Image (spheres, rainbow, N blue to C red):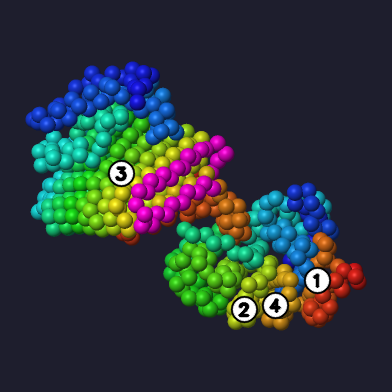
Amino acid sequence: MPKSKRLTELATPFASVVVELEQETSFVKELRGNALAQFNSYGLPAKKEEDWKYTSLWGFSQQQFSHQAIPHTVSQAQTEQLALLKQAYRVVIVDGVFSNELSQIDNLPTGLTVSSLAEGLASVQSHLGGQINIEKAGFNALNTMLMNDGVVITVAKGINIEQPIELLVINSGATENLATHLRNVIVLEENSQVTVIEHYVGLSDIQYLTNVVTEVVLAKSAELTHYKLQQESENAFHIATLAASQAAHSQWKTNSISLGAKLARNDVHTQLLGEQAHVVMDGLYLLNNKQHSDFHTRIDHAVPNTTSEELFKGVIDDKGHGVFNGKVIVHKDAQKTDSNQQNHNLLLSRNCEIDSKPELEIYADDVKCAHGSTVGQMNEDHLFFLRTRGLDEVSARNLLTYAFAVEVLERIPAGDIRKALSAVVEQRLPQGGQ
Amino acid sequence: MLEIKNLHASIDGKEILRGINLTVNAGEVHAIMGPNGSGKSTLSNVIAGRDGYEITQGTVTYKGENLLQLKAEERAQRGVFLAFQYPVEIPGVSNIYLLKAALNAVRKYQGLDDLDAIDFLTLVRSKLELVKMDEEFLHRGVNEGFSGGEKKRNEILQMALLEPSLAILDETDSGLDIDALKTVSDGVNALRSSDRSIVMITHYQRLLDYIVPDFVHVLSEGQIVKTGGKELALELEAKGYSWVNKNA
């Protein structure tokens, strides 16, 4: 594909930014070099590319991003307040930099390591870059060129970590147009289990870019429960790739809740590489004003007997624009694949937009693949019913909106995390919930 | 309680109600019968306050207040209740949440505080008994996966909890087998009182064997063409609606 002149000749000369981790190995240097070459030849994705058809980067390309963060003043008390969970191991990254003082990762149990990218890289180097493609993938290339921090989590064989880990990524608002490029690596060895929450928060209404890649490696029978809560500032760009590979009998449950940002693009991808591997890939996007959210998901059923369940729901108000593109690929010989993908959207205004596109590519013949996609408005019969029971119109609309969204939350096992996420979603409804 | 005078209502420019006159006093039970398309559902929708109907003439007065000026929720808060012919299923809203929100909306209008969790549950349990519903139904989505009979019982449960002054029962008997009809009717009968009026809208006489009305009205082409006692329903059942039209 020819490079897009318009978008490679950006106002921000990303290619001239130099990043180096402490004691950076030649392996990482080489990755960066390759990524730079890719970025230089392909640049950022243009709208004519199928994967970016509904998401324009024109506005993005006009921004002057900075890679120099001004010191912030985020305090322990603030992180305490911002955190989704009180009972969790907490890793805090502020303005793109891991904060040892704000993090709470002392006294980790045996078998669990949680560290900054620079510190943890050596232990996961063989996996770095293994889950993502940097060819013709501008943001992944950019992230690889410029990754400067993030978190590395490893769980040793047979270890079950009860307490969840919250990765709290804060933009303090201190630096106008700050660009951060984070790389997280989560590696679960055989038979291990852990819960990880990625939580992105913006504290101001300034413009900035969070460009994050999270790579997940699940060995045989490993189980990762993963949540992502995106509450960036209303003027932020949030560009994320979340990519996993799953060995036999592994289970990955991931649920992305996208509430903030002016433009949010999430690529969620897993490869089911061993038999009986199972993925639950869920998501919820609530959009208002002129927010734009684009979820591109991809599930590769590479071998026989793997299963996937996918449910994404969107609530779109004002001039919001939602995009859902769900690719399910059943590779040749991946017999007995069982996959179900659903995308349902509720439109609350006349001016909003949704582009929903299921994409199934099936190269095996003995498979079960279901998919469904709907776009609808508030049900007037439901609304009238609630009003005849005394609920005023605003409360009734809120209740029905929440009822539509709650299906995604109900797939989260009951407990503190579901409770906390439900409260956040309820708070985000047009009138702040009931 | 309710006084309807010369009510004309249209939808999409088509006149459905053409001069309804009806007076319902406190404590009375009225049955409005009529063939399909006679305007029965329109009448219940107009009383409950559904949007989309144009009132071209006439008045509806409820407890001395102009009902037509009020929004659906304001009518509900003042004690007007509509039991639906086809109760909607709302997954994601639990029955207990709905009941609590509805009761609190009514209490708020009455200047009362929300009931606390324990008092609320005690109250709901007593009402569940009335319609022979299991407590398990409280935690399911509103009517989600309910059978026809369970949905109708759920409507009566809501009525029992909200204790309306005026209840409109729209084809409450439709889709019920005899056992369910008996349970629902027993629930309604238990709610009859000297300060509560009930208007039953029905196609068939069958319901009136179980909930015996004080008055029966026959609705035809948007007008009440005949009024009588409960024996009128039997006569209708025997002779058919065409008999009324010929004699109107």
| Residue A23 - label | none
Residue type indicated by callout 3: His
Picture quadrant where residue A118 is located = top left
| Residue A269 - label | 3
Q: Dot 3 falls on which chain?
A: A
Quarter holding the C terminus of chain B? bottom right
Q: Range of the magenta residues?
A: A348-376
Q: Residue furthest right?
A: B247
Q: CA gap, disc 1 to disc 3?
A: 65 Å
Q: Is residue B71 above or below residue B246?
A: above
- Mark 4: few, some, or many residues within 10 Å (few <14, many ≥20)? many
Q: Give the main secondary structure of the magenta stretch.
A: strand
Do marks 3 and 2 share a subunit?
Answer: no
| Residue B217 - label | 1
Residue type indicated by callout 2: Asp
- Mark 3: few, some, or many residues within 10 Å (few <14, many ≥20)? many
